[in-house]
Image: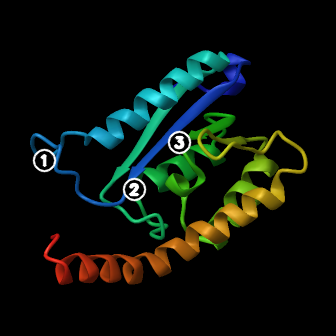
Amino acid sequence: MVNYLEAKQNVAALYLRLSKEDIDKISKGDDSESIKNQRLLLTDEAIKRGFIIGNVYSDEDYSGTDSSRPAFLRLIEDAKLKKFNIVLCKSQSRFTRDMAVSEQYINGMFPLLGIRFISIVDHVDTDIKGNKKARQINALINEWYVKIYPTISKAYIGAKCGRDNF
């Protein structure tokens, strides 16, 4: 693994997460299509920005509300060891769907360690001044989504079954 202090360049940690089993897996241990697509998107973005990819951290079949995800915990430990200076995610919700965890790392520990957090699809970048409120609103919506989604899903399935569309 490349240490950004030794490389004296921008070293990115790519973080990927998928919360449920993907039917596109060929066999246990294979990456899902979603994880493959996240890896491709983040790799392309890192190359486009001239970042060195230090490591790829991937948690599959873990909820974004679970802060004990194995790759997530490795990423946090490696951050403390200063093995990278950028965390690159597809979206802030891939990193976490817990507002307290978002605040703890994205707006707390990472800036103190000199680590930049970037999520591509929701345009989060801790290097952009004045972006903190948008990150906090994203975190609130991401946490809220987890709480409201089961209700929405049940209502949708119930409506589809009632019309014989399921």
**Residue sitting nearer the eye, 33 or 78:** 33
- Residue 86 drawn at (x, y percent): 66, 36
Tell me, yes or no, whether the two marked residues, 2 and 1, touch with CB atoms within 8 Å.
no
Q: Is residue 123 above or below residue 155?
A: above
Tell me which residue sits at (41%, 32%) in the image.
Answer: 39
Instruction: Give the mark, 2 or 1, whose residue is nearer the N terminus.
Output: 1
Q: Is residue 133 above or below residue 124?
A: below
| Type of the residue with mark 3 | Lys
Q: Secondary structure at mark 2?
A: helix
Q: Secondary structure at mark 1?
A: loop
Tell me which residue sits at (35%, 62%) in the image.
Answer: 62
Q: Residues within 10 Å of mark 3 (few under 14, many from 20)?
A: many
The residues bearing labels 2 and 1 have C-alpha atoms spaced at a distance of 17 Å
Q: Which residue is mark 3?
A: 90
Q: Which residue is mark 2?
A: 70
In this rendering, the label closer to the viewer, 3 or 2: 3
The residues bearing labels 1 and 3 have C-alpha atoms spaced at a distance of 24 Å
Tell me which residue sits at (53%, 47%) in the image.
Answer: 75
Quarter occupied by the C terminus: bottom left
| Type of the residue with mark 2 | Pro
| Type of the residue with mark 1 | Lys
* Residue extending furthest toward the right: 130
Q: Secondary structure at mark 3?
A: loop
Q: Is residue 31 left or right of residue 149?
A: left
Q: Which residue is mark 1?
A: 28
